């Protein structure tokens, strides 16, 4: 899979640097041409000789130690890379990358490269959770850096928690998936987030989880609605549908019978899920109603237009004066209507807000009679429309149920559905 791929591997100074040896060895075994750049701190944990022997290539650490007069090493490495992988990535290198610092061989190469960059952070759990580190990682994700999340477990510092470098075999799998996706034209270079499904406990499917929604019917709405003005014009919004798609995919994985009701989006829905395509809020309402009686869980992740044009012109509207006023009338509030008529259904709403998140979200939960509401601050990096990640607070009538930091939308979906499944089981 990695035959001939040129991978520049940045090794930085955390205890997990010792795993770089295994990582080099696995990458080389799968055919990659690996060029290592170590930071000075990394050399406290593992020697250059080890990595040079495993890769059969010169290992770099000093920007000014130019061993090949015909090239400038950091530019040469930056240019030759098909991928720059930093593993382990310390809080320090993440901060340098986020802020564009170039004070050693690795950070200079990272600034100079135009190749995709993938990082596998590893550090103490409190360092990982620190707002500065989270902020820097968000910045990188926003810029397109691929992230292999650390796993949870016993850390070298004695703590148990998130921060352990993902296993070298998993990192190699993710690298292979990246090149495979690129080769198949899946625009892997645009993927902004990679979690490691096999190992990461947030995404690991346990036997009990697999049973969580067996026998349940889950109805999910996703995407934006389209409200027609005339045959060639309409009003819509920026919803990508990705959050709803993630909920549908994970519900299916957890054993549910899933119906996905999707509006306007540029993204393909998950495979093997039953899909009903709709355009307007009215059509979405009809589609939800057609599934309502049998539904056990209804997840309203769609961005439904609150208003639609009062008049829909049958023919293309012609230009008239210098200004044009469109009169809009209120659409049905699907969630609020469902909330009024719910019997056994477990109703989950979404609230994308820019301010006073908790107040607005809880007010919507009450008004729409939801069981849970998933609120996000769409002004935050890595959150909301179009992204592959989300950070949400989940509320019920009593208040905050769960606060989820920035993570893949699939992971948000898994947590949300687990809470719903638990509560339904509790009722029974
Ligand atoms: N919703 C709905 N039908 C509508 C509007 C919203 O079903 N006509 C649902 C959304 O799918 C979402 C929840 O209601 O689950 C909250 O949507 P939001 O647009 O945030 O709520 P609004 O009540 O429209 O409030 P706002 O004034 O903030 O737009």
Image (cartoon, rainbow, N blue to C red):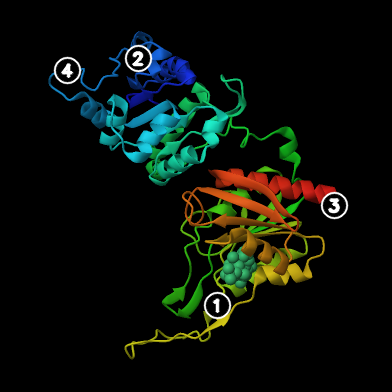
Disc on res. 55: 2
Q: Earlier in the sequence, mark 3 or mark 2?
A: 2
Q: Secondary structure at mark 4?
A: loop
Residue ID at (51%, 55%): 384
What is the crowding at mark 3: few (fewer than 14 residues within 10 Å), some, or many (at least 20)?
Answer: few
- Residue 192 versus residue 178 in the image, above or below: below
Disc on res. 307: 1
What is the crowding at mark 2: few (fewer than 14 residues within 10 Å), some, or many (at least 20)?
Answer: many
Report, in whole angstroms, how far the alpha carbon at label 1 lies from the one at label 4: 66 Å
As drawn, which residue projects farthest toward the bottom?
321
Residue 280 position by quadrant: bottom right
Disc on res. 387: none
Report, in whole angstroms, how far the alpha carbon at label 1 lies from the one at label 2: 61 Å
Q: Earlier in the sequence, mark 3 or mark 1?
A: 1
Disc on res. 427: 3
Quadrant of the picture in which ligand 1 is shown: bottom right
Query: x and y percent of residue 206 in the render?
Result: 70, 33
- Residue 202 versus residue 221 in the image, above or below: above
Asked if the residue under mark 1 is in contact with the one under mark 3, i.e. CB atoms within 8 Å, the reply is no
Report, in whole angstroms, how far the alpha carbon at label 3 lies from the one at label 2: 58 Å
As drawn, which residue projects farthest toward the left?
70
As drawn, which residue projects farthest toward the right?
428
Q: Identify residue for label 4.
A: 68
Query: x and y percent of residue 399 in the render?
Result: 72, 55
């Amino acid at each position: 899979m990695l035959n001939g791929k040129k991978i520049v591997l940045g090794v930085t100074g955390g205890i997990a640097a010792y795993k770089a040896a295994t990582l080099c060895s696995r990458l080389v075994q799968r055919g990659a041409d690996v060029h290592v750049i170590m930071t000075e701190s990394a050399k406290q944990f593992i020697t250059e000789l080890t990595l040079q022997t495993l890769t059969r290539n010169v290992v770099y650490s000093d920007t000014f130690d130019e061993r090949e007069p015909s090239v400038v090493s950091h530019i040469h490495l930056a240019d030759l890379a098909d991928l720059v992988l930093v593993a382990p990535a310390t809080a320090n290198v993440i901060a340098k990358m986020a802020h564009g610092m170039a004070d050693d061989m690795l950070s200079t190469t990272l600034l100079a490269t135009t190749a995709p960059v993938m990082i596998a952070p590893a550090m103490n759990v409190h360092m990982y959770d620190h707002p500065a580190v989270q902020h820097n990682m968000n910045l990188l994700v926003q810029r397109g850096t691929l992230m292999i999340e650390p796993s949870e477990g016993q850390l070298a510092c004695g703590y148990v928690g998130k921060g352990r470098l993902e296993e070298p075999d998993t990192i190699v799998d993710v690298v292979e998936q990246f090149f495979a996706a690129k080769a198949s034209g899946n625009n892997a270079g645009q993927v902004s987030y990679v979690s490691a499904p096999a190992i990461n406990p947030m995404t690991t499917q346990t036997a009990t989880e697999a049973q969580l929604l067996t026998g349940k019917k889950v109805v999910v709405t996703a995407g934006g609605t389209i409200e027609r003005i005339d045959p060639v014009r309409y009003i819509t919004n920026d919803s990508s549908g990705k959050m709803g798609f993630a909920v549908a995919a994970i519900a299916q994985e957890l054993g549910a019978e899933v119906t996905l009701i999707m509006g306007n989006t540029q993204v393909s829905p998950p495979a093997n899920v039953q899909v009903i395509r709709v355009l307007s809020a009215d059509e979405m309402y009809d589609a939800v109603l057609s599934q309502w009686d049998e539904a056990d869980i209804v997840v309203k992740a769609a961005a439904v237009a609150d208003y639609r044009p009062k008049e829909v012109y049958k023919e293309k509207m012609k230009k008239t004066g210098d200004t044009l006023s469109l009169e809009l009338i209120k659409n049905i509030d699907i969630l609020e209507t469902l909330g009024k008529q719910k019997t056994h259904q477990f109703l989950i709403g979404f609230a994308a807000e820019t301010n006073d998140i908790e107040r607005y979200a809880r007010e919507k939960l009450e008004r729409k009679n939801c069981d849970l509401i998933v609120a996000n601050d769409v002004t935050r990096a890595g959150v909301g429309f179009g992204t592959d990640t989300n950070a949400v607070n989940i509320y019920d009538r009593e208040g905050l149920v769960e606060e989820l930091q920035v993570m893949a939308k699939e992971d948000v979906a898994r947590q949300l559905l687990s809470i719903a499944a638990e509560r339904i089981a509790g009722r029974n």
